[in-house]
Image (cartoon, rainbow, N blue to C red):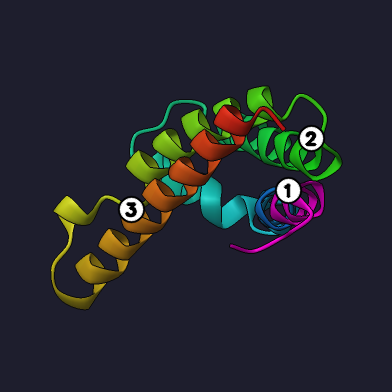
Amino acid sequence: MFETDISALTAVGRLLLGGAFLFAGLRNIANTKLLSGMMSARGVPQAHLVLWAGIILQITAGLMLVVGFHTAYAAAVLIVFLIAGTLMFNNFWDHQGPDRASRINGVVSNVALAGSFLLVIAAGS
């Protein structure tokens, strides 16, 4: 139906998807105190260390997606990251009202991102 350059679309998709995680990782560097405190409050042991591991993972895997280097591995790692992040930061079951709705939206967004990563893995690019 549409004649497109699949490789160009794939590159743009990887830029958008990987770039979002690269940006988030860099942004999280400026928010380590807040995020570490939130993680500690949720019972994450060694929260500061776990946070820095997550930041490094976001930046590295995001960059790998952007440049097209071992994209399936980067996508798989980011799926695991999404699962952990969803459990730590989108605990809608502990909230009510608008805050609960906001956290449910976060879960739905993360599920959609995981689906995108599965497509990256399936495409092998």
Boundaries of the magenta span: 1-15
Residue 101 at least partly seen: yes
Q: In this orientation, which residue lies closer to the viewer: 15 or 28? A: 15
> From this viewpoint, which residue is outermost toward the right?
67
* Label drawn at residue 72: none
Camera-near label (1 vs 2) is 1
- Tag 2 or tag 3, which sits nearer the N-term? 2
> The disc labelled 1 sits on which kind of residue?
Thr
Q: Residues within 10 Å of mark 2 (few under 14, many from 20)?
A: many
Q: Which type of secondary structure does the marked residue at label 1 adopt?
A: helix
Residue at 34%, 34% in the rendered image: 43
Q: Looking at the rendering, which quadrant does residue 69 occupy? A: top right
CB atoms of marks 3 and 2 within 8 Å: no
> From this viewpoint, which residue is outermost toward the front?
1
Which residue was labeled with disc 3? 107
Q: Is residue 122 above or below residue 111?
A: above
Q: Residues within 10 Å of mark 1 (few under 14, many from 20)?
A: some
Q: Residues within 10 Å of mark 3 (few under 14, many from 20)?
A: many
> The disc labelled 3 sits on which kind of residue?
Val
Q: CA distance from mark 1 to mark 3?
A: 25 Å
Image side of residue 22 versus residue 39, left or right: right
> The disc labelled 2 sits on which kind of residue?
Met
- Tag 3 or tag 1, which sits nearer the N-term? 1
Residue 41 at least partly seen: no
Q: Position of residue 77 (x, y in %)?
A: 58, 27
Q: In this orientation, which residue lies closer to the viewer: 55 or 38? A: 55
Which residue was labeled with disc 2? 64
Camera-near label (1 vs 3) is 1
Q: Which secondary structure class fits the magenta region best? A: helix
Which residue was labeled with disc 1? 10
